[in-house]
Amino acid sequence: MNDRIASLLRPELRDLAAYVPHARPGIEVRLDANEAPENPSPRVREAIASAARSLPIERYPDPQALALKSAIAAISGARVDELLVGSGSDEVISLILTAFARAREGVPQPTLLTPTPTFVMYRVTARGHGWKVVEVPLDASWDLDVAGMKRAIEFMRPNVVFVASPNNPTGNTMSEARMAALIEASPDALVVVDEAYVDFSTASLSSWRARYSNLAILRTLSKVGLASLRVGWLEAAPQVIAALDKVRQPFNLSALSQRAAQAVISSAWQDVTAHVDAIKRERARVSDRVAATGCVVTQSDANFVWVRTPVPAELAFEGLAARGILVRSFHSVGGRLANQLRISIGSEADNSRMLEALQSCVLG
Ligand SMILES: Cc1ncc(COP(=O)(O)O)c(C=O)c1O
């Protein structure tokens, strides 16, 4: 690309890097991406295979994804006109930042408010869309700093607030009183509560949408064992959904993904929830065993654990990688994340291998 063409790129792209998954030779166990282990139920795979067999492959997908939305409505409680489906919740995040991007009077850029540390795609997508990003650190127990968030709302006047609960990478659910205070302090912002991990917790805020018209709930099938399908959705007021539909590509979700997700939800959902229950049991075992190595484990409501290592996280990360196990380390962020690892809950065998390796890395 010559300099004249390069000069046309958004200046924000200079600070961004494309998403490149960690690829290292010798990795045999991947516990770095919060995917679920394989679901042993043949019914889930069979539902997808039979959806694929009957697919009219020469036709475009249903641009409104009505059958899939009806299936999602049945498990989420949202009405069909309160749902938008996307190619993963990543796409939905992008659509929100495309549509709600009008800068307020006297402010040069639209502003996104989010706590930190949290899911990086809020910041990355917002920067790529030319938004200003304001990040307020979580408190010492990784819960919302409501006073800090309120000050940011008052002075920075965000268009959109994103909060992941349970949060990635810390795994905890934000306290309800603080979430209520945040939503009430944001009457002129869209508050998106990202419940990507809610299947592994007990407390969804979806019923709060009846109380707060500026609240939207983001969900995904990726964490419950269906990441390859790339199906995410937003539950929000019909006016919000209608606005987002205007910026959505008409065929944003492939027919294969629509049909497969609908088939799993309609005919094998019990097997998905049974798998989630098994992952939660493994989470309890892994949390106890990690704590027994001398690491500090945050109580997790997600499908991963947030671990403070007694040695620098980089050492533990490299030690695990040398033993064929990939996890996520936050040592490069520094500060209070310098000793933090995020370890996804995998299959029982993979978890046991990780635990044994962690023990040698931490205890020597
Ligand atoms: C909090 C959170 N939201 C959204 C996503 C993206 O999920 P999807 O696969 O639906 O794009 C992730 C994935 O790691 C996540 O951690």
Image (cartoon, rainbow, N blue to C red):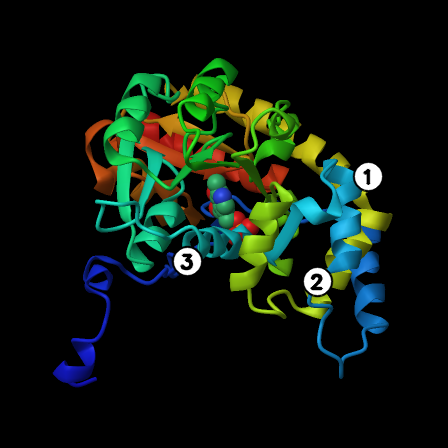
Relative to 345, residue 86 above or below: below
Mark 3, other Cα within 10 Å: few <14 / some 14–19 / many ≥20: few
* Mark closest to the chain's N terminus, 3 or 1: 3
Mark 2, other Cα within 10 Å: few <14 / some 14–19 / many ≥20: some
Please tell me whether mark 3 sits on a helix, a strand or a loop: loop
Q: Which residue is mark 2?
A: 64
Q: Which residue is mark 3?
A: 26
Mark 1, other Cα within 10 Å: few <14 / some 14–19 / many ≥20: some
Residue 36 horizontal side relative to residue 3, left or right: right
Please tell me whether mark 2 sits on a helix, a strand or a loop: loop
Relative to 287, residue 197 above or below: below
Q: Quadrant of the C terminus?
A: top left
**Residue 116 visible in the shown view:** no
Rendered location of residue 247, percent (x, y): 51, 63
**Which residue is at a point 20% across and 82% down the rendered structure image?**
5
**Which residue is at a point 46% across and 25% down the rendered structure image?**
183
Q: Which residue is mark 1?
A: 270
Which amino acid is tagged 2? Gln
